[in-house]
Image: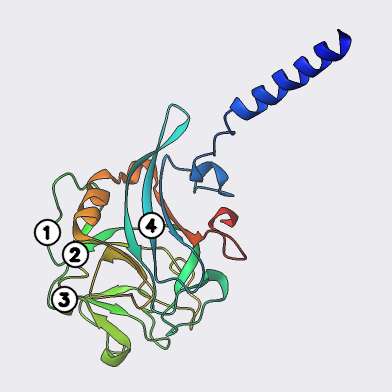
Amino acid sequence: MRRLLVTGSVLLALAGLLGARPPAVLPLPLRLAGTGGGSQLITAVASGTAATTGTVTWWSLRAGRWVAAGSAPARFGANGLAEGASRKQGTATTPTGLYRLPYAFGVKAAGPGTRYPYRRVGERSWWCQDNAARAYNRWMEPRSTDCRATEAEHLITYPTQYARALVVGFNYDRPVRGRGAGIFLHVNGRGATAGCVSVPAAAMDRILAWADPARRPHLAIGTLSGPTAITRY
């Protein structure tokens, strides 16, 4: 009788284990080292450093819980991703890390519901990428004489990609010459980017209608695992 009872107990325990649900996976923002201290976050995740595609998800913190507000397929640099702290300019890599989003801009007017400070692109709007210029990694209007046209982006010549966009604060507050300039979250072009993160136009409009500067949204870029895993940032 005792043997039967023990066997029955073991079978019940096994049945409980087999029927138990696996532990819930924490939302991605809770697995990051930091989210920037705000209540909104955008994550851009690639499968590995060589990947040129992935997923962008935007999250809202509600009553202490991070909830996905939307997601879209993403494109990254033509040469994949690189650690932001050691990235080199001109490598066509998207810098990994956690970055603030200073302001929005676009060839088109701001879309409905946009609350971000928004700069309209005109014929004289440039972004300086000249390492020798005082305005390195800054919007210029007009282009300053010390920033060579060959080392700057004439923003209006990219009406598709820069229809609407967000400036990514990579190498922005204290620019390091040679690390890179002009990293944005923008609308898809024909393929991979030169180092930015891009999404379909409809997704960009949704992000701008969702983003609230008062909630201090940040952008976290990284891979699923490895030295550039998004959870490190």
Residue 164 at what x, y percent from top left? 20, 62
| Left-right relation of 30 to 93 | right
Identify the element where label 4 is drawn: strand
| Left-right relation of 22 to 59 | right
Can you identify the residue that label 1 sits on? 109
Disc 1 to disc 3, C-alpha distance:
13 Å
Q: Please, what is the three-letter code of the amino acid marked with disc 1?
A: Ala
Q: Tag 2 or tag 3, which sits nearer the N-term?
A: 2
Q: Residue at x 38, y 63 (%)?
A: 168
Task: Answer above or below: position of 213 versus 54.
Answer: above
Q: Residues within 10 Å of mark 2 (few under 14, many from 20)?
A: many
Disc 3 to disc 4, C-alpha distance:
27 Å
Can you identify the residue that label 3 sits on? 156
Q: Residue at x 16, y 79 (%)?
A: 157
Q: Tag 1 or tag 4, which sits nearer the N-term?
A: 4
Q: Please, what is the three-letter code of the amino acid marked with disc 3?
A: Ile
Answer with the quarter of the image where residue 132 lies: bottom left
Disc 4 to disc 1, C-alpha distance:
26 Å
